[in-house]
Image: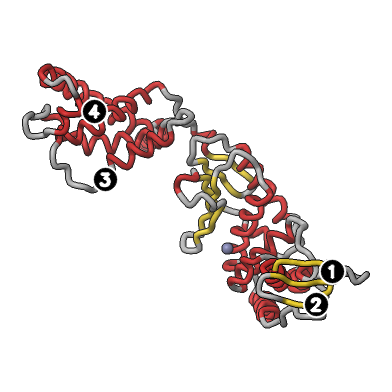
Amino acid sequence: MTLEKKMAEIDSALRLITKLAASNCTQYDESWRKVNDIIRIAEEKLAIDMQDHPAPAEFFKNPYHHTPAREVYRLPNEARAFVGALIECKELPPRSQTRIQRLYKKVNSTRRIKGYYKWYGKIREDLIWALSSKNWPTLSESESEIPIGNMTLINQTDQDPAASIKTVQIASNLYKSSGIAGLSKSLYGNVFLVSSIANKKTTMAWYNPNTDQIYVIARKRWSNQQEHTVLHELGHRFWRKFAGNDRKEEWISHHRTISGKVELGVGDLVPTTKYTITKIEYKTTHLIDEKGEAAYLPTKKLEQLQRELKYPTLYSAQNYEEHFCEALGLFLQNELKPPHLEAFERVWT
Ligand SMILES: [Zn+2]
């Protein structure tokens, strides 16, 4: 090996080490120093200006009587970089999430700043508080990337990922042992664990078909419902990328067949019960049992039951793909009931 070659090798190894060491916190450290310097100067000037103004609120309302420290003009840009780096680098203390979100919104606002003192007055307390993040623990790489089989759970929250790890692990195991050909091919790539603030509160997981990415909302506790949602979302990936065309065709025709089924009427047995319908009114459905005893059911309930009987869940009625994902989730959780179970098994197992 020539000397040049050896030097080049050492050089590239060094570059790799530098790259590894340069975590998100390099940006944080740098912008913390800049923001800290600006604020120190601004607060000093402010203390002098405010000597004749005992009420800070009034002082900041009147932006034209004072010229802020020149450094403050640089603050909007620096503060934006600082808050962004802070979120990437630091573990947020409990109950600080809202305050950070508010600050993040303020510094990323696209509104033109009219008076810098006024703007500074609105942001200074939160920003000074955010500077104390210097002492917060740093997000460690090992904690934020958790391998689960062929997948990697990437924790983008400050929350304990234990419940989410369990959810994805169970989903992965159920996919592997399903008996459905090719289903476990869907287990790959990154699963992003995100904070519930990022999306609607009711969403538990979702799949972006354009980027082929799976997102899971961080929750404190494992729940059957969230597990179902993860199974459902991975089902979209399977349907779009791996499910065989002949099976898909079969499923689509199954979906179309049941969407045209007749509704329950007088004389019909209410399925899964011992009651027969005797009369359907706008609000109340009249029933009798085997002994001829009368009973009642809100008609709304009967309608819901009819929809549920056609499909495994109400949401399945959306389209054949959603119907598949819903049925798949229930099937894997051992909760798919006849006659849906037979239909599902006929096509997919
Ligand atoms: Zn869906």
Locate residue 202 relative to residue 81 in the image: left or right. Answer: right
User: Gap in Å between the C-alphas at discs 2 and 4?
Assistant: 78 Å
Q: Residue at x 53, y 45 (%)?
A: 193
Question: Disc 4 on helix, strand or loop?
Answer: helix
The residue that mark 2 highlights is 278
Identify the amino acid type marked 1.
Ala
Which tag, 3 or 1, sits closer to the chain's start? Answer: 3
Numbered label attached to residue 109: 3
Question: Disc 2 on helix, strand or loop?
Answer: strand
Residue 63 in picture, x, y percent from top left: 11, 34
Label 1 Cα neighbours within 10 Å, binned few <14 / some 14-19 / many ≥20? some
Q: Residue at x 78, y 64 (%)?
A: 337
User: Gap in Å between the C-alphas at discs 1 and 4?
Assistant: 79 Å
Residue 322 in picture, x, y percent from top left: 60, 67
The residue that mark 4 highlights is 34
Which tag, 3 or 4, sits closer to the chain's start? Answer: 4
Asked whether mark 3 and ligand 1 are closer than 8 Å, the reply comes as no
The image quadrant of residue 214 is bottom right
Which tag, 2 or 1, sits closer to the chain's start? Answer: 2
